[in-house]
Amino acid sequence: MRYNQILLRVIRYRFARMGLASVGMPLVLTFSVTNKCNSKCKTCNIWKKPDRSSEELNLEEIETIFRSIGKLYFLNMSGGEPFLRNDLLDIIRLSERYLYPNLVHIPSNGLLTDLIEQRVKEILETISSKTFLTIKLSLDGVGELHDEIRGVKNNFLKVTETYSRLSNLRQKYPNFHLGFNTITSKFNLNHLDEIIDYARSLKPDSYVTEIAENRSELFNLPDDITLDAETYQKLILSFRENTRQNLKSRRSISKYTEASRLVYYDYVVRILNEKRQVLPCYAGLSNAHLNPFGEVWPCCILAYTQSMGNVRDFGCDFKKLWNSNRAQTVRTYIKDGNCYCPMANQSYSNMLCSMTAMAKVAKNLLLAS
C-alpha cells in the first residue's frame, strides 16, 4: 500500500468518525490465529481456558475473509502463541495473495526455538522482499524473573537461544526485523532498568515496552497487574531517554517505530492520568481484530464485551460484517468516549489520524537525522 493510499484512508476515517463518510476498510488487522499457548503468564489467563482449536477458522474460511478485506498496511499475527498454529505459513501465503501487507508482525514467547527458526525462514522465503517481517520476542525479566512471570522453567534460556538463531537471518534478509517486547507490570516494575540494559546489549532492531493491561481478550479484567500513572511515568523516563539516544542508529522502519514510541509513551502517561481518550480513538475504523473463532472486535481491550459479530454469520464476508448495524453501534460506543486505554497497536493508528501527534513524530525523526 502506497503512502498516498494510507493518507486517503486516514482522511476517510476522520470523516467516517464524524458520520460524513462511509467507513471503508481497516488499515490494520490483528488476527489472533490461535488461543493455544505454552506460556502460563501472570498477566494473561488465556492459557487457563479449555482448548478450542477444533473451532478455529480453517484455511478456506480465512481465504474468504482475506479476500473480502483487500489491501491493508499492517497485519499483526497474534495469539496465544502464533507459532503453535501448524498452518501459519499457509495463512501468511493467503495474506500475501489478498492483503498485500507492507508489514507483517508476529509476537512470540520464543519457547519453540527450532520450530520458530524454521517457520521464520519459510516465511521470509514466501513473502515479497518489499514486505517487512518483524518478530518481537517477549522479555519480561532477566533470568529467573522472566521464568517466574511467564510460568515456564528455562523460558529465559530458550528465548535468548531463539533470539540468537533468528539474529543470524538479519544479514541475509534486509526486510527482517527482530526485537524484544517487555510487558511492564507490578511483577517486574523494580527490575525495568536491568531488563532494558540486557535487551539493549543484544542489539535488537527495536525494543519496546508496553504497560500491562486488563483486556477482555486475556480474561484478566479483575487482575491487579496495571501500574498507576505516577509509577509508570517514573519508570519510563530512563527508557525514553535510552530510546531517543539510540534513534539515530535504527534502520528504516525501526527508526519510524521508535520515533513513534517516544510520542506514544507521553500519551500513555496522559491517558493514565486523565482517564479519557486523549486522542480520538479510531478502533473499529482504522483497526480490526479477528479472533481465532471468527469474532470481529474493534480492539482486544473491548474484545468480547463489544464484539461486532462473528464473520461466520456473514458467510465469512468481512465487509458485510464491517458495515453491519452492530458494527456501527460499537463505533458509536467508542466515539462517545465510553472507553479509554493506552493499547499500543491502536494508539499508533490514533496518532496517524492526528496531525498534532504526527508532527511530534516528525520532530523526533528530524532530531535523529
Image: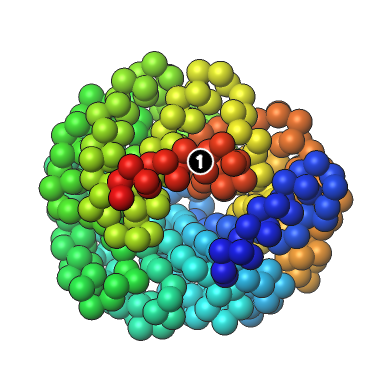
Q: Residues within 10 Å of mark 1 (few under 14, many from 20)?
A: some
**x, y percentage for residue 250?**
27, 54
Relative to residue 291, is residue 364 depicted above or below?
A: above
Name the residue located 49 percent from the left edge and 60 percent from the top edge.
76
Regarding residue 196, the answer to whether it shows in the image is yes
**x, y percentage for residue 67?**
67, 76
Question: 348 or 58, which is in the foreground?
Answer: 348
Looking at the picture, which amino acid does disc 1 mark?
A: Ala
Name the residue located 38 percent from the left edge and 59 percent from the top edge.
253
Left or right side of 182 for 159: left
Q: In what element is the residue under mark 1? A: helix
Name the residue located 35 percent from the left edge and 78 percent from the top edge.
124
Left or right side of 281 for 269: left
Q: Quadrant of residue 314?
A: bottom right
**x, y percentage for residue 54?**
56, 67
Relative to residue 344, is residue 237 depicted above or below?
A: above
Question: 2 or 54, which is in the foreground?
Answer: 2
Regarding residue 53, the answer to whether it shows in the image is no
The quadrant of the rendering that contains the N terminus is bottom right
Residue picked out by circle 1 = 359
Question: 131 or 90, which is in the foreground?
Answer: 131
Name the residue located 30 percent from the left edge and 26 percent from the top edge.
237
Q: Quadrant of residue 185?
A: top left
